[in-house]
Amino acid sequence: MTDAASNNQPEALEAAQHVVDEVTSYEYSGDPSTIESQLLDGFGEAGVDVPADELKRLVQEIDHLKKDENAGTPQVRQASSR
């Protein structure tokens, strides 16, 4: 089992997904740096860590909603508790 897989915890994934849901709802029309900042703030408040590549993917997918609002909220694949 990889470190990323072993660090995935249902509670951390759920908390991170809640943050992504909120940021998607309120910030998807913002620029990528705003989206990233809001995600990082939310993850910090939720006490979860998301790997850099996962954060980048989430920012890109949220930003993509400007072009395709039907794409849906991105799903968190990796998260761990702090």
Image (tube, rainbow, N blue to C red):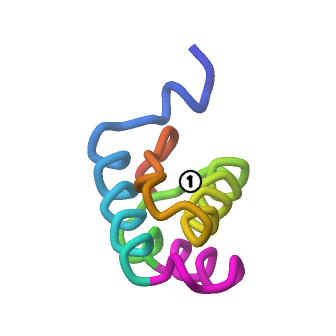
Q: Quadrant of residue 26?
A: bottom left
Q: Is residue 29 left or right of residue 32?
A: left
Quadrant occupied by the C terminus: bottom left
Q: Quadrant of residue 45?
A: bottom left
Residue tagged 1: 50
Q: Residue at x 49, y 38 (%)?
A: 77
Could you say where residue 36 lies in the image, as x and y percent from the top left?
A: 63, 74
Q: Residue at x 69, y 77 (%)?
A: 32
Could you say where residue 41 lies in the image, as x and y percent from the top left?
A: 50, 80
Is residue 32 shown above or below 63? below
Is residue 29 shown above or below 20? below
* Amino acid type indicated by mark 1: Val
Task: Based on the picture, tell me whether residue 17 belongs to the magenta stretch.
Answer: no
Depth check: give the residue in front, 15 or 23.
Answer: 23
Per the rendered image, the range of residues in magenta is 27-41
Q: Residue at x 56, y 13 (%)?
A: 1
Could you say where residue 68 lies in the image, as x and y percent from the top left?
A: 55, 61
Task: Based on the picture, tell me whether residue 38 belongs to the magenta stretch.
Answer: yes
Secondary structure type for disc 1: loop
Is most of the magenta stretch helix, strand or loop?
helix
Depth check: give the residue in front, 29 or 80.
Answer: 29
Q: Is residue 41 left or right of residue 63?
A: left
Q: Is residue 53 left or right of residue 5?
A: right
Q: Is residue 62 left or right of residue 72?
A: right
Crowd class of label 1 (few under 14; some 14 to 19; many from 20; radius 10 Å): many
Is residue 30 shown above or below 19? below
Q: Residue at x 59, y 86 (%)?
A: 30
Could you say where residue 39 lies in the image, as x and y percent from the top left?
A: 52, 72
Give the total number of marks visible in the rendering: 1
